């Protein structure tokens, strides 16, 4: 077999486009392809991006998980031209997102914003601190910290929604200390 000059040596995150509402099917099919082709040493993670949003239905608030980017899934892998064909011909996947259908790895900033990997945060929060939400439907909202779970880098904050104070859980990576 010829040497592949387009293979990377470290895993990176890439974006795949799927048919409408086929994200879960594409993920399952990719997992089967990985197992059948013994590609565990090349493909490490597959993520369907989701976000939690609060909906008000009949006067009641409900936390709902939705697809953050319908028709897209993320894959962490060591890319090479030899694997391109295998992935792009998996049922439910229309191709890679990038120039001319060739994959373009995500930047560290994009990985952080999409919460694909846990990035340790180098600040501490205390009860009573004011924070600003950096992502999701509440981006830009200023909240007050009610409870801190420093070990898991999570906090419960009070958000003013619909004229009421509502406590929500957030990750340290989702907020900025003011």
Image: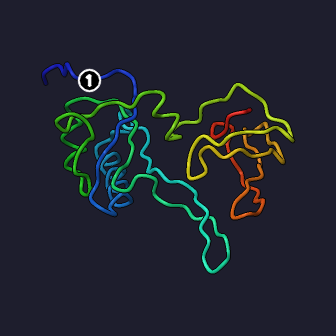
Which residue sits furthest right? Answer: 127
Which colour scheme appears in the figure?
A: rainbow
What SS does tag 1 mark? loop
Where residue 167 sits, quadrant-wise, is bottom right
As drawn, 22 above or below 88: below
- At 53% from the left and 40% from the top, the residue drawn is 115
Q: Is residue 23 left or right of residue 62?
A: left
Q: How many numbered marks, from 0 up?
A: 1
Which residue sits furthest bottom? Answer: 58
> Where is the N terminus found, in terms of image quarters?
top left
Residue 33: image location, x then y, percent: 30, 49
Q: Is residue 176 left or right of residue 87?
A: right
Q: Give the camera-side residue of 2 and 94.
A: 94
Q: Give the camera-side residue of 142 and 74.
A: 142
- At 79% from the left and 42% from the top, the residue drawn is 149
As drawn, 1 above or below 94: above
As drawn, 84 above or below 91: above
Where residue 97 sits, quadrant-wise, is top left
Which residue sits furthest front? Answer: 163
- At 78% from the left and 30% from the top, the residue drawn is 124
> Where is the C terminus found, in terms of image quarters?
top right
- At 86% from the left and 41% from the top, the residue drawn is 128
Q: Label 1: which residue? A: 7
Residue 121: image location, x then y, percent: 67, 29
Question: Tag 1: Cα neighbours inside 10 Å, few (<14), some, or many (≥20)?
Answer: few
Residue 172: image location, x then y, percent: 69, 38
Residue 116: image location, x then y, percent: 50, 40
Q: Give the camera-side residue of 130 and 34.
A: 130
As drawn, 53 above or below 157: below
């Amino acid at each position: 077999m010829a040497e592949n000059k387009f293979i990377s040596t470290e895993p990176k995150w890439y974006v795949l486009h799927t048919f409408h509402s086929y994200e879960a099917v594409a993920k399952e099919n990719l997992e089967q392809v990985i197992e059948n082709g013994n590609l565990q040493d090349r493909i490490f993670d597959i993520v369907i991006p989701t976000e939690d949003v609060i909906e008000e239905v009949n006067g009641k608030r409900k936390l709902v998980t939705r697809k953050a980017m319908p028709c897209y899934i993320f894959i962490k892998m060591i890319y090479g031209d030899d694997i391109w064909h295998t992935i792009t011909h998996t049922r439910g996947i229309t191709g890679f997102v990038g120039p001319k259908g060739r994959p373009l790895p995500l930047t560290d900033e994009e990985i952080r914003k999409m919460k694909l990997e846990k990035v340790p945060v180098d600040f501490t929060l205390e009860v009573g601190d004011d924070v600003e939400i950096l992502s999701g439907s509440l981006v830009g909202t200023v909240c007050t910290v009610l409870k801190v779970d420093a070990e898991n880098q999570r906090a419960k904050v009070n958000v003013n929604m619909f004229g009421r104070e509502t406590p929500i859980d957030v990750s340290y990576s989702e907020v900025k200390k003011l």
